[in-house]
Amino acid sequence: MTGALRTGGGVRVLLLCTANVCRSPLAEVLLRAELGPGTDVDVSSAGVRARPGDLACATMAEVAGVAPSGSPARQVDPRLLQQADLVLTMTRTHRAAAVDLAPAALRRTFTLREFADLAVLAAGGTDLPAAGSPGRRLADLVVAAPRARAGRVAGAHDDIPDPHGLGPAEHERAGAEIRRAVAVLGGLLRDRAASSAHAG
């Protein structure tokens, strides 16, 4: 991707976790809600060790206060990764697994928390347009984000631990981390010119 939208379509975001029943479905639902209807960003999710057909975790949906994803779990494969313009994973292990499956996706594959941080750095240090659709802004951020890595220290803080099978407190913690990262992206992808006019 060169920073421009696909011909005749939007930017495709693929969210990855382990089983595609807890973290990535929540991130999918929250990112769609942040962007709103009719956006030119297509959001989907999958798992690196999913059991196709499994349903989303009801505990996560309950503690996060969202309707559970109606889509059954699906296993990621090279085709999904090749089709995605941006791959956002919940951990560095998921990111490595994605790149192993599709090495060409390296420069557009990040953990969710990593990309949220890099997007903030990129938005502050480049000539990203003040206005534009979410898809166009996201396409620009995907191109700019790798260049912002020098301004950020990577590490274990990039991971959102798996709460599946654990108690509500662990689900709440993971859900809050996902919500924060998604909110950062939502703020960057909405039209800043429109937001400024509304604020004024």
Image: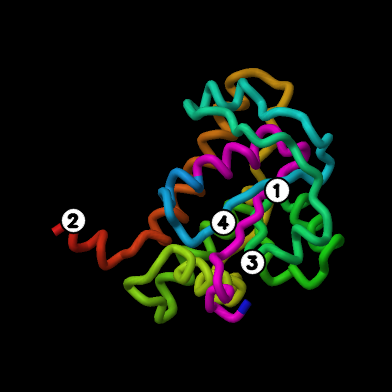
Give the numbered dot on residue 199: 2
Which residue in the structure is indicated by mark 4? 42
- Mark 1 crowd level (few <14, some 14–19, many ≥20, 10 Å Cα): many
N-term-proximal mark, 2 vs 1: 1
Contact (Cβ within 8 Å) of mark 1 with mark 4: no
Which residue in the structure is indicated by mark 1? 16
- In the displayed structure, does residue 136 sit left or right of residue 148? left
Query: Distance of mark 4 from mark 2, alpha carbons?
Result: 28 Å
Q: Is residue 87 magenta?
A: no
Query: Distance of mark 3 from mark 4, alpha carbons?
Result: 10 Å
Contact (Cβ within 8 Å) of mark 2 with mark 1: no
Q: Is mark 4 on a helix, strand or loop?
A: strand
Instruction: Examine the rendered structure and indicate whether residue 120 appears above or below residue 44.
Output: below
- Mark 2 crowd level (few <14, some 14–19, many ≥20, 10 Å Cα): few
Query: Distance of mark 3 from mark 1, alpha carbons?
Result: 14 Å
Q: Quick check: can you spot residue 148? A: no
Which segment did they paint magenta?
2-30
Q: Does the magenta stretch include residue 24?
A: yes
Q: Quadrant of the N terminus?
A: bottom right
In this orientation, which residue lies closer to the viewer: 36 or 103?
Answer: 36
- Mark 2 is on which residue type? Ala
Q: Quick check: can you spot residue 175? A: yes
In this orientation, which residue lies closer to the viewer: 193 or 117?
Answer: 193
- Mark 4 crowd level (few <14, some 14–19, many ≥20, 10 Å Cα): some
